[in-house]
Amino acid sequence: MNDRARQRVFILRVLVLSLVATLLGRLWYLQVLSGPTYRAAAASNQVRELVDPAPRGQILDDEGRALARNRYEYVVTVNNASLAAQKDRGKAVLRRLAPVVGLSLPELTQKIRLCGPKVPQPCYTGSPYQPVPVKNFDPADSAALQRALVVVEKSELFPGVEIAEQPVRIYPDKSLASHELGYLQPITAQELTSPAFAGYQPTELVGKQGLEKQYDRQLRGTPAVRKVSVNAHGDVTGTLSTTQPVPGDTLVTNLDAGLQQALAKELVGGIKTAQSQGKGLLATSAAGVVVDVHTGAVLAMASVPNYDPNQFIGGISQAQFDALQAPEAGSPLISRAFDAAFPPGSTFKGSSSVAILANNINGATPGTVTPCPPSYKVGNQDFGNFEGESFAPVDTATALEVSCDTYFYQFAYYEWVHDGGLKDANPLGPAREDFARTAKQLGYGSATGIDLPSESSGVVFDRAKLYRYWQQNKADFCSGATKYAKTDPQRAAQDADACATGYRLYAGNAVQFAIGQGSNILASPLQQAMAYAAIGNGGTLLQPQLARAFIKPDGSIDRLVTPKVRSVLNAAQKQALTTVREGLTLVVQGPKGTAKDAGFDKQLDVGGKTGTADVANQGPLNGQPDAWFVGLQPMSAPRYAVVVMIEHGGQGGIAAAQTVANVYKDIYGLDGHAAVWPNGVRPTALPKVAANGEVKAPQTGIVPVTPLAPLVGGAPDPVAVSNARKAIQDAKAKAAAAAAQQQGGP
Amino acid sequence: MTDHPLPWGTARSAPARRRRSTARDVVLERGGPVRSLDWALQLAVIGLAGVGALLIYSATRHLQTNKGLDPAAFLKKDILNIGIGLVLGAVAARVDYRALRAYAPIVYGASVFGLIAVLSPLGSTINGAHSWIVLPAGFQVEPSEFAKVALVVGMAMLLGEKRDGEDAPRDTDVLLVLALAAVPMALIMLQPDLGVMLVLVFIILGAIAVSGAPKRWVIGLTLAGVLFGGAVIQFHLLKPYQEARLTAFANPTQQLSSTGLQVNQAKTAIGAGGLTGEGLFHGTQTNGGYVPEQQTDFVYTVAGEELGFIGSAGILLLLALVLWRGTRIAAAADDAFGMLLAAGVVAWFSFQSFVNIGMTLGIMPVTGLPLPFVSYGGSSMFANMIAVGLLQNVHVRSGRKA
């Protein structure tokens, strides 16, 4: 032994002690100082939330017929955590499963892989602990379901694979009210992070359009949440807590499936009528709205072309979605009834008549007669009547009956001059803007507030709006004047003009506005319906409503939607409405009415206004005006307003008016049309919804129309589903018996 | 469960001097072999092994139950391992260590043979390391564990040789030592078993340092080790999974690597234990099986979670006591061979304990080293117990002129 060695043994001791001290320090840090953090991490290690969506509330029509309901399907699911715990990471199970669910192995593998930053679609967006649905089976297709039951019968060959009952949304009448109902799609990553979707799970389907979107929270209900403890292999070791699912509310709408179907049918007929006039009319699309003028209830609203929201169930392919958006398809995803605006043409004369009479423009009263020449000169430009017609001097009602443009030009020009004409002063000041102001009071140019996620607000371009627009864009105009001086002198001149006097309202634009033409006025059919509802009900502008009531899962009423008043016209305007209604009556019933030959049933006392709105002065769409008809009925005490617009449908008095005439016949069941409501009386009672989702039609004491869909809305097809349930139970029993036998054997 | 035919593991006759002592003498005689044992050391070792058995039981009983197997199977096997280990240790303690010198070449040769056997078709791969020999009836041996013992004995013999009145090993002795150590190390590198490799490096370094060899060797070898380590990382000489394991501790949140997950789960389990722990058999992480390899390399996490800071620090202090007694035995040894034997064992245990616990605490890389006396595993338990036997051997024969 040497001293050097002993010295080094001492060093070894010091070394050992310092190592022990290091470990002790680290141990203290981890356990005592960071203990709470790790305890929390440990807790989240063991608890997983499994979320099962609640049955989505049905959407019913006013008689309890299901517009959207749920059907039971049987879904084969794969549990990723369970696969991962298997020796071969579940490869053998997937190989066996692929033929059972009719997918190739790569397809199946892609379907169940978890989405991540580097994982392209297709992939699963849910949590690793949520079973991934791979294939749905219709209970009615018992042969296919029977084949799938092998995963239950031979469960030892399919660890991690299960078969479960799952509600699936269906729209039983296919494209009926597709724009209003909307459709469901998986929630996007962006939506998940937004506060509007707080509490939603990555696997959920959410409404992307229509009522499904508007009332998603109410329809969705509260999903069932199971908090389970899991071990490191992802095996569930116990259930910590369970909350029961609360099914969504049933939404009873104001829509009537029968009327909706009639309207859609008549719109298709209207398009055909327009096209068969021999004028080469395109009649590319049509839209219609039926509202109750006293409540604002939307009884039917349709737009063709439309789409089948069932396409979106189970995921729509990009190709299918692109096809729906293609212009050749006529943009079926867009509703022309509430989500697009068109020049209203002469249907806007209802508003202009109120403006003339209520403001006594140029001293006008209901009895004042004014010439109706073939044309009227504004400045150096002639503005003519439709097809150069002329009539003996007319009062307001007659001007509406014959749709005399020059009558309205005179008052519009007078008003324009009184507002200052082209004057350079700030037009935000004293200008009265009677025509534009009245239009806005009747709801033109602003959103109707219908309970849908999107709608068109239309356009009302008045002096004030022009001035604001000019202020916002003045800098651009002024710089354009110099910028294009050399390259595009015409553009430079235009910009210089706009830079200096772009706020000016020209007389030509002002007079065209009064007859609903030009670019300063655009309206959606729904806006027109609400404006005419106000004319019909005596001056109350209502908010259109699709929802009528929300019914809780136990059948009690959660919320009744009451009519909402947007604004009320003043006394002078209300008084003017009497004259306007007289005019509307003459349009249909008068000797010179523009719609007198449209086939309106005499008993129904219909009134209305035609509209033929030019869309272009040149190009392919020149001579392809949009056809409008806005109807009120009965004129003695208006109840239903019906609006039909046929894009490029020609003269309003022909195709559009005939379509409206047919819709009224449908409502009342006249001239061989099946009645939507006997005697045209809409049932006032709500349909009753039982706790099991069964729906009873309201007791009206009248014979119901032929139902479009089974009146039992929410309850699944009982035979097929009970068969499927029994088959699954049998398979489970068989598997259990086989397992017991095996254990009892040698 | 005798799993290795070591020449000194069989009951060879003790030196003549002891031949006539009766069993009564052995137990009671003052200065007799039992009374003169280092009991603090021995009790600490038995305490560690006993706690280890409980921790192993806690870590395995649920998994065993889930598989429909005997929940106490690991506990029973561990207790058997401890028993066999204590017998082997007693044998190692009883043979006079000075006579052991004569067997050193045989021990060395046997261990090299064992390591070659592993690389032959007899060997099999478990957890990525080709370091096992599977015997019939479900037994398996890990020869590299015994190579640690062989290296300790071999180093002690070569460096403790007294020549020409020289006090310290000469350069040629050191070179010879390095040459002889290179053979088992190369064989282990082929398996590859990085953890054992590093333990051997530390045994050699420790033995050379303590032997009194010139400082330049100590410093030179340390530097060489560091440079080699750097080169290995720099030029990616390791297999990707090895590199991932080594570097995972520095980047444990990288959950994609299973090792990173393992380190995270280990830290979570230990951290969740807090000051007093969740109670033996009540650790939720342990019961849920969240920490992989929990009964072997990560057994300390069971202590961390269930026994808390108090319990796991207690284990650490028991280990410290073992090491402290080891250095005491080294310092008190009569000759260089005895001192180097003890120092080699201390270097081995201290490095292995530090790396193992450090790994579960996330401050050392995951290298697959078991915690001495505590982790489950027969070969490791036997080798550790034999090493303790060697410490007792040196202790019993110190300070007495025979």
Image (spheres, rainbow, N blue to C red):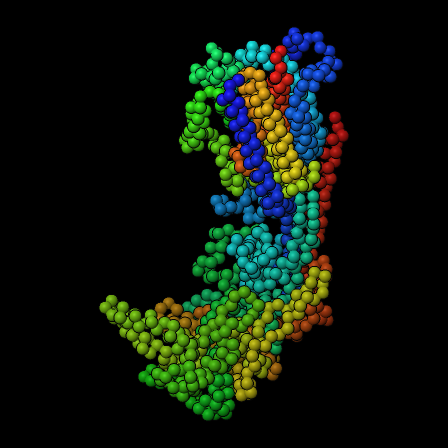
- What residue is shown at x 48% (from left), y 90% (from top)? A360
Above-or-below relation of A353 to A310: below
Above-or-below relation of A415 to A209: below
Closest to the observer, A405 or B130: B130
Classify residue A671 by image quadrant: bottom right
Closest to the observer, A569 or A372: A569
Classify residue A373 by image quadrant: bottom left
Closest to the observer, A612 or B180: B180
- What residue is shown at x 66% (from left), y 48% (from top)? A227
Give percent across and percent down for residue A332: 49, 61
Q: Is residue A3 left or right of residue A170?
A: left
- What residue is shown at x 47% (from left), y 30% (from top)? B239
Is residue A398 among the parts visible in the rendering?
A: no
Give percent across and percent down for residue A691: 72, 60
Classify residue B338 by image quadrant: top right
- What residue is shown at x 43% (from left), y 28% (from top)? B223
Closest to the observer, A202 or B115: B115
Give percent across and percent down for residue A721: 69, 50
